Image (tube, rainbow, N blue to C red):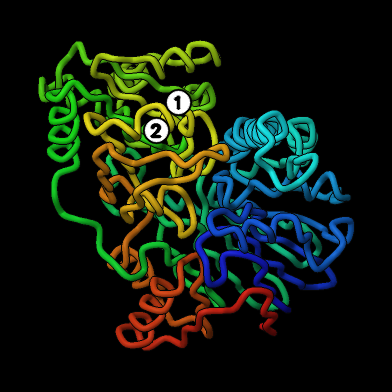
Amino acid sequence: MHLTFLGAAGTVTGSKYLLECRGRKILIDCGLFQGYKQLRLRNWAGLPFAPADLDAVVLSHAHLDHSGYLPALVRDGFRGPVYATEASCELAAILLPDSGYLLEEEAEYANRRGYSKHHPALPLYTEADAERSLASLRPLPFNQSHEIFPGVRLLLRPAGHILGAASVTIEADGKTLVCSGDLGRQHDPIMPPPQPVRAADYLLVESTYGDRSHPAESVEDLLAEVINRTAGRHGITVIPSFAVARAQLLMYYLYKLKQRGRIPQQLPVYLNSPMASDVTALYQQFRHLHKLSQSECEGMCRVAHIVRSVEESKRLNQSKEPCIIIAASGMATGGRVLHHLKAFAPNPRNTLLFSGFQAGGTRGALIVAGAGSVRIHGQDVPINAEVVALDHLSAHADSNEILHWLQGFDSAPQQVFVIHGEPAAADALRRRISLELHWHATVPEHQQRVAL
């Protein structure tokens, strides 16, 4: 049994872990690298094996840093099954084609404006590639063990975080490997806490917030304060947001704030993401997977006006009256939010509200760090708007919550691999695991191969 770390080792994106057991090659997660250019270039470098030689993929959940490389994998020859929960399959059917569309749109825009160094600029994959990859998805229920190959069993447990997110357990050769996936919060307002795991010989645990605790202040208080302050100076609040989970959590809070009269009832809210609208509908379909009541779910869905067309999106950029605009992507790496940043970031009356983790090298990270300008579509855009970073809305467990989940194990794993975190966060969690739990923990390096 061997494990190779092909992504999210020493960084927080590009999750890919190759498990070799009983003559089979199984890829746990198939994510895109995001952030720093040297990481994004890995998306183009290919993998150290032929995709046709891979036997199966298991997705912990549908976020693109865990699923977004799948269209390229299938295009390049992978023909096996892709196992995930039913909700993850439904989300992937929305996210992956949208990712391909945005990649094509970005390449076309770069060619039209002539700001790319590549002639012509090409997308990593296309919308058609993504559509074809969906045929590989094989939905599995939570908490049921399945023999996916002779002598190889797979079990998916609820991990909180987002709809369908799972911790992955694979048993083979008398050994048990657990990958935490992205762990959710203990007291998330929408998702239940991650289900405990009792035993593992080898454990991969995420460390996105491994070096910090989430702030204790009230999210509603902070959101109301920022929105009212911005509206009071006749400004516009632009919120870059992931279309899955983060947009819905924001809409839930805005629904609650309006319901309680804490922000103006008439203040327009725009969700500028058809994909986020489609995702929001899944919260009705999978009500058994989250904590919202029927009325809360309906209120969350109704609080925002859905912006679907490109023309309506462009008209938003001419807005002069106070409003709230939620648009993808959450780290300002692409999508419609870039056009809103170009329109609204130069004006000090406006606010840019970042609602979660910003990976190093992304525009979001640069803006939150205080950059005076960022480059968008080949132009330097000044950042004069107020910038607010709100870590409270993260769907990731913080350091204490990760330790709480780890304490659910009945015995220590033989080895813990700390993954999916920037170097400081991963090492901080490694130290806590070693000192507080007395487990053997290491931070693997990119492309490191270990025998289990």
In the rendered image, residue 422, in percent from the top left (x then y), is placed at 45, 68
The crowd level at tag 1 (other Cα within 10 Å; few <14, some 14-19, many 20+) is many
Residue 110: image location, x then y, percent: 67, 35
- Of 349 and 313, nearer the camera is 349
Q: In the rendered view, would you say 207 is above or below 40?
A: below
Left or right of residue 330, residue 174 in this image: right
Give the vertical position of 155 relative to 95 (above or below).
below
Amino acid type for the residue under numbered disc 1: Thr
Residue at screen point 59% across, 63% down:
169
Label 1 – label 2 distance at C-alpha:
8 Å
Task: Please state which of residues 338 and 187 is positioned toward the viewer in this rendering.
Answer: 338
Mark 2 falls on what kind of element? helix
Visible residue check, residue 383: yes
Residue depicted at x 77% and y 41%: 122
Taking the image as shown, residue 287 lies to the left or right of residue 214, namely: right
Q: Which mark is residue 425?
A: none
Q: Position of residue 378 (x, y in %)?
A: 57, 40
Q: Give the residue displayed 75% in from the left and 41% down from the top.
A: 121
| Residue placed under numbered mark 1 in the picture | 280
Tell me which amino acid carries mark 2.
Ala
Residue 41, quarter of picture: bottom right
Answer with mark 1 or mark 2, whichever residue precedes in sequence: 2
Toward the viewer: 349 or 144? 349
Along the line of sight, which residue is nearer the eye, 413 or 344? 344
Disc 1, disc 2: CB below 8 Å?
yes
**Mark drawn on residue 247:** 2
The kind of secondary structure element at disc 1 is helix
